[in-house]
Image (cartoon, rainbow, N blue to C red):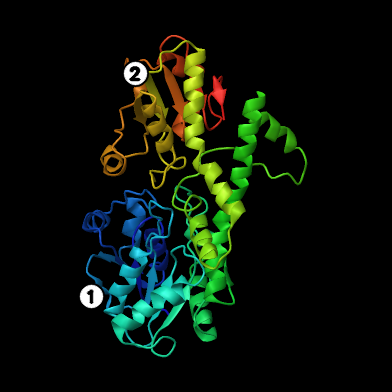
Amino acid sequence: MQKLTIGIIGLGYVGLPLAAAFASKYNVIGFDINRERIQELNDGIDRTLELSTKQLQAASHALQFTCDITALKTCTVFIVTVPTPIDSSNQPDLTPLIKSSESIATILKPQDIVIYESTVYPGVTEEVCVPVLEKGSNLIFNQDFFAGYSPERINPGDKEHTVTKIRKVTSGSTPEIAKTVDALYASIIEAGTYLASSIKVAEASKVIENTQRDVNIALINELSLIFDTMGIDTKEVIDAAATKWNFTKLYPGLVGGHCIGVDPYYLTFKAEELGYKPNLILSARQINNGMGKFIAEQTIKQMIKHDKKVNKAKVLVLGVTFKENCPDMRNTKVVDIIEELKEYGCHVDVYDPWVDPHEEKKFYKHGIIANPFENSIKYDAIVTAVAHDAFKTLTQENYESISQDLPVLIDVKGIIPNPSWRL
């Protein structure tokens, strides 16, 4: 196994850290269709900030990057880590997965193993991807080549729970291949592995991880909606309830990102295809998707309460990434707050020290401003939408210094000392 050359297909938040981890023991070739991304990685730059230049340099003896799929001909194991998004109708978009499989098929050889890490509904690996591999390679599944599935467990921005420190679920298309896949991951995963009985079980285990979290957060979000109408502070209620040992302590908030806000739709799609209506899961999605609009409405109510003119009001939103202390903006629900405020006629500025303004313009085009605490602009309302460490140190005086007259401070993350309204 030491002589293996592993090909990693997709070098984003999941693929790059995985490639570096495998490079500690094997030769690894990382492939991505984004030429700019490949050039940056070859220059020792990771714009996702998952790996430092030092870490990239440390892995460079066994890790190379390319946009040419034929450069992976010597690989005997291929690991696919491409995105699995949803479309505008919340339906699974398997295009990146299918195209990746088509590319691998052109260089697939007898006895090769293709392992998928992308989040999917149960059945995608064997029912969607494998036929693409067979058609493009003219090889027979489980006779000439084999497949595996090991769901990604990357937590963007988390420098403690890195890829090798999170237990990994593994699986394979035959009992023998399952053991091979498990041994491969076990050789680099310090936290150990869990060998699932089948590829479908492994696929299902991933999709319910985030579905469970989505449903749990939806419950807390719905409670916050109820308590807000009662004039009760949700955080105080949760803190009180959490004094019981078996109470799960969660706080309300926005549910975005590439996992929790997306994965449940893969499961609901398959369930509905089979004739089952997953009402609880879909209701949770509806609640969580509505939180941005709710926060914007509360902002407007607070402005009116403080005799602020809403039309053409200047509003500052602090943070636009989907979570704290990382530059990841995929499926960020902060955008829902911004767009809703604009619908009311507000002028919205966005400040996020973690986001490259050039990258933000590619996706949302809101425009990231420079540090507002270092200029003279005054705002009618301020919304703290992301709990970056840089925002946690701000004082009440900092907020008041950039507020027009009486400050209207909307606290989504529980970090403003004395907010006007808190989720």
* Residue at image location 44% in from the left, 12% down from the top: 308
The image's mark for residue 247 is none
* Mark positioned earlier in the residue sequence (1 or 2): 1
Q: Is residue 7 left or right of residue 66?
A: right
Q: Say which amino acid is labelled 2.
A: Lys
Q: Position of residue 166 (x, y in %)?
A: 54, 60
Disc 1 on helix, strand or loop?
helix
The image's mark for residue 70 is 1
Disc 2 on helix, strand or loop?
loop
Is residue 37 in view?
A: yes
Does residue 264 lie above or below 202 as drawn? Answer: above
**According to the image, label 2 marks what residue?**
312
Q: Position of residue 139 (x, y in %)?
A: 34, 87
Q: Say which amino acid is labelled 1.
A: Thr
The answer to which of 59 and 242 lies nearer the viewer is: 242
* Residue at image location 45% in from the left, 18% down from the top: 398
Does residue 276 lie above or below 198 as drawn? Answer: above
The answer to which of 98 and 57 lies nearer the viewer is: 98
The answer to which of 300 and 389 lies nearer the viewer is: 300
